[in-house]
Image (cartoon, rainbow, N blue to C red):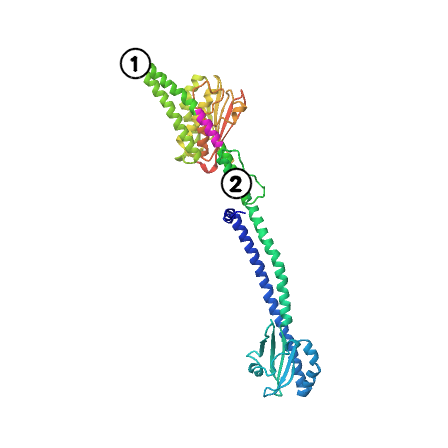
Amino acid sequence: MPLVTIKRLAKTTGFRLALWYSLIFISSSLLLFALLYFPLRSAIKEKDRNIILAKLNEYTLQEEQSGLQGMLAEIRLEDDHNSQAGFFVRVADSTGQSLIVTLPPEWHQLDREFSPLFRSGGGADGWIVLPAEGRDDSLEIVSRRLGSGYLLQIGRGSGERQKILDYFGEVFAGIMLPMIIFGFAGGFFLAFRSLRPVRDLIQVVRSIDIGKMDARVPSRQTGDELDELVRLFNTMLEKIEQLLTGMRAALDNVAHDLRTPVTRMRAGIEIALQSDNKAETLREALLDCAEESERIITMLNTLMDISEAETGVMKLHRQPVDVVSLLAEVVDLYQYVAEENGVTVVVSGPADLTLMADMDRMRQVIGNLLDNSLKHTPPGGRIELVCARQAGKVVIRVQDTGAGIPPHDLSRIFDRLYRGDHSRSQRGLGLGLSLVKAVIHAHAGSIEVESAPSQGATFILRLPAECSLLS
């Protein structure tokens, strides 16, 4: 593997996680060994010393019951047994002269003169530890002054104990080697498996960077945090794709809809330039240009309002609004158009229904819905504006008996600049319903439509309870 690849791998999060996993695993194993080894060593050492003390107590009791000679006879009798069992036994007089000395086989090279510490009977706790030369062993001796004034010393080598501990260490080392290998392998496997969604996400981002907007991160359906991240990321990509598609369609529609007023303005200017320069002709041309300019400005302002509402930056001046009075006010503004078209418009609802909302924006919403209904309702038709309180929400219904909305248009009527087949013969921007939806969402509400061809349409506005109150 090239050195550059190794360096790049060492910088990855997966490698660092794997290394941490492995170090934690190995450290835990070593800690477990320490927690087992040191208590085991203490327990074996304590057991050995208890055996030595038991032997010391046995000879002390023998001396008390049978006297010094009886104890010495017992020690001589057990000399071979004590030597083979690894016991050191020594009896010395008050001058330090040894009367009896029993040595384990591996301690025959022990100096018969012994050290001053050895002759004195040991340290403050009565124990003496004599290390062996050239091997990992030591002789632990405890001393006791008998009633007769003689010194009794019993000891035992730590070799057997050390063999047990060494065997335990060897077994643990034999286990640790495969465990270390397993720890590293398992750490790398778990780390790279855990980060697989992140690598998939990186791959998808690279695909999107080269223009593949339909790329998605595969989900493992594990329900963990990374799976939730994948789900949210895919949802975000879908929204971005929808927004980009909508932007392309909106730009196409804007270009198409702006072409007509700009063409009219240009035609008016050309007519004015080719005329006989009469003031009346020039004035009419300027008025036509001003009208088309106003149409363009209205379209751009409406698009800005929709964007502000959708992005949550639209400023709403909320105040208590009497819903029935609001509906009646909007109907009065359109009453002349309704009478001219032969359409009946009625308002109904409880008089005490009050809504906390932006008065101007809600007037704009109701006006757009009523204007839309008037355009599609034939003479003799009827439009009803009904408000009510349902399940803690304020509900406003705008229902007409017009031509209805074709099923293939229902899912698109709220799109920007979208105009159905029935609307293309009439002048309009194709932004009215988009603005209505955006403003309602800015009020934390919702809008839906129910319609069927030749059976009219019903627009239903719902505003949450926290935006409403009773007067």
Region of the chain picked out in magenta, as a range: 242-253
Residue 385: x and y, percent? 47, 26
Residue 94 occupies quadrant: bottom right
Our reading of the magenta stretch's main secondary structure is: helix
Residue 435: x and y, percent? 44, 29
Residue 107 occupies quadrant: bottom right
Cβ–Cβ under 8 Å for marks 2 and 1: no
Q: In the rendered structure, which disc, 2 or 1, sits on the residue that comes first in sequence?
A: 2
> What residue is shown with label 1?
280
Q: Residue furthest top?
A: 276
Residue 293: x and y, percent? 36, 22
Q: Which residue is drawn at the image coordinates 67% and 85% (left, top)?
A: 72
Nearer the viewer's eye, disc 2 or disc 1? Answer: 2
Residue 388 shows up from this direction: no
- Between the residue at mark 2 and the residue at mark 1, the CA separation in whole angstroms equals 67 Å
Q: Which residue is drawn at the image coordinates 54% and 52% (left, top)?
A: 19
Q: Amino acid at mark 1?
A: Glu
> What residue is shown with label 2?
201
Query: Is 278 situated above or below 101?
Result: above
Q: Amino acid at mark 2?
A: Leu
Residue 383: x and y, percent? 48, 22
* Label 2, residues with CA under 10 Å away: few <14, some 14-19, many ≥20: many
* Residue closer to the observer: 328 or 224: 224
* Residue closer to the observer: 60 or 14: 14
Figure disc tally: 2
